Amino acid sequence: MLRGFAFVTMASGEEAQAVIEKFHSHEVLDRTIRVEFAKQFKKPSPPPPNPQIVETRYKLYVSNLGWKVRSSHLRDFVSENFKVPVSARVVFSGPSGKSGGYGFLSFATKEEAESAVSSLNGKELMGRPLNLKFSEKNVSNSGSQKDEEEKFEGQPEEFA
């Protein structure tokens, strides 16, 4: 069943109250509608950084990510196809919130990271083949990896 909704702006609070009184619980196209003042959306606060999760120096740069891929998608994909990484992050650019199309995976050992490259390189995530390689200082000409990663809280300085 579809959950339809709409927002209507009235000229005054009194006018809005009159509309609520007249149309709340009213039948429209065989459906009972609910008319009420909009509730303020409160964005959930991010969970506090987990001090037990520590970045490692065995960090991989993952490119060719689809625009809709989030860190949880990347982590789940790696966990299902290889093993659980220490961390998985997709980088988003500035205020636009748009995915940068790349991210980072960290593993506990060099062997795990090397094995992840050979196991996952070229595998498709959300319709796009992944490119994995060991992370380098500068990711792109437009800015350094440090600039991009400073947006993440709790990032140890050694990964800059």
Image (cartoon, rainbow, N blue to C red):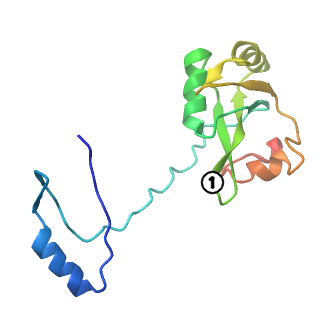
Which image quadrant is residue 100 in? top right
Residue lying at the far front in this picture: please name it: 29
Instruction: Name the quarter where the C terminus is drawn.
Output: top right
Residue 29 % position (x, y): 14, 53
Q: 154 above or below 106?
A: below
Residue at 70% across / 57% down in the picture? 94
Q: Tell me: 15 left or right of 108.
A: left
Is disc 1 surrounded by few (<14), some (14 to 19) or many (20+) residues within 10 Å?
A: few
Q: Tell me: 81 left or right of 141.
A: left
Q: Tell me: 34 left or right of 83.
A: left
Instruction: Name the quarter where the N terminus is drawn.
Output: top left
Residue at 80% across / 41% down in the picture? 159
Residue 158 % position (x, y): 82, 43
Residue at 21% across / 68% down in the picture? 36
Which image quadrant is residue 113 in? top right
Q: 76 above or below 160?
A: above
Q: Which of 113 and 27 is in front in this view?
A: 27
Q: Which of 105 and 11 is in front in this view?
A: 11
Q: Mark 1 points at which residue?
A: 97
Residue 86 % position (x, y): 64, 29
- Identity of the amino acid at label 1? Gly
Label 1: element kind: loop
Residue 84 visible in this rendered orientation of the protein: no
Residue at 17% across / 61% down in the picture? 34
The number of numbered badges drawn on the structure is 1
Residue 108 visible in this rendered orientation of the protein: yes
Residue 26 % position (x, y): 10, 63
